[in-house]
Amino acid sequence: MTQIDFYILPDTSLEARLDFACRLTETIFRKGYRLHVHVADEALARQFDDQLWRFRPDSYVPHAIVGDEHTPVPVTIDWREPPEPGIEAMLNLHPEIPEWFSRFERVAEIINQNQDVLTAKRECWQTYKRRGYPVKAHNIG
């Protein structure tokens, strides 16, 4: 069964949420997982892609927006379709849960103190719990 992890941040800004998402992406990549980052739209996909390039000068996480990559990469970013089979983990930056989330071993959700994010992710938490998935909360900071 898919393990769901919620990371709860004290910050309110989108920038802080994306900074933590970059750190979490790097951690997941370093543990050897293939990761799919599910976002709400192309603008957020481009913003997250750019932030992954800039978040730490001494770090490199091989990644690409689906459709932009020329060779397979361990971290994909998309807002449209489910990723290819064989990817073990998903970081969900979308306000809603994609229908295909259960194909992953692990799903990570990031909550910060922005009211829109709080509202959306509370609903996600309740949905996972109602469906019987194991959910863990990690307070960051």
Image: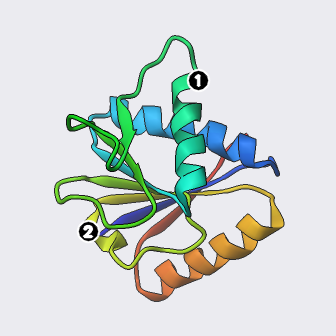
Where disc 1 sits, the SS reads: helix
Q: Measuring 17% from the left and 54% from the top, which residue is drawn there?
A: 86
Q: Residue at x 74, y 49 (%)?
A: 14
Tell me if mark 2 has few (under 14), some (14-19) or many (20+) residues whose alpha carbon lies within 10 angstroms of its own.
some
Q: What is the distance, in whole Å, between disc 1 and disc 2 at their CAs?
A: 30 Å
What amino acid type is highlighted by mark number 2? Arg
Look at 41% across and 66% down and name the residue there. Answer: 80
Measured along the vertical axis of the image, is residue 4 above or below residue 102?
above
Location of residue 58 in the rendering, given as x and y in whole percent from the top left corner: 51, 11
For the residue pair 62 and 31, the one nearer the viewer reads as 62
Q: Could you tell me which residue is drawn at 77 percent across and 69 percent down?
A: 116
> Colour mode?
rainbow
- Name the N-terminal-most of marks 1 and 2: 1
Split into 4 quadrants, where in the image is the N terminus?
bottom left
- Dot 1, crowdedness within 10 Å: few (<14), some or many (≥20)? some
The extreme top residue here reads 58
Q: Secondary structure at mark 2?
A: helix
Rendered location of residue 65, percent (x, y): 40, 45
- 138 shown above or below 82: above
* Residue highlighted by disc 2: 103
Residue 58 left/right relative to 30: right
Q: For the residues carrying marks 1 and 2, which lies nearer the camera in this image?
A: 1
Task: Provide residue 139's location: percent of width, then percent of height.
Answer: 67, 50
Q: Which residue is mark 1?
A: 54
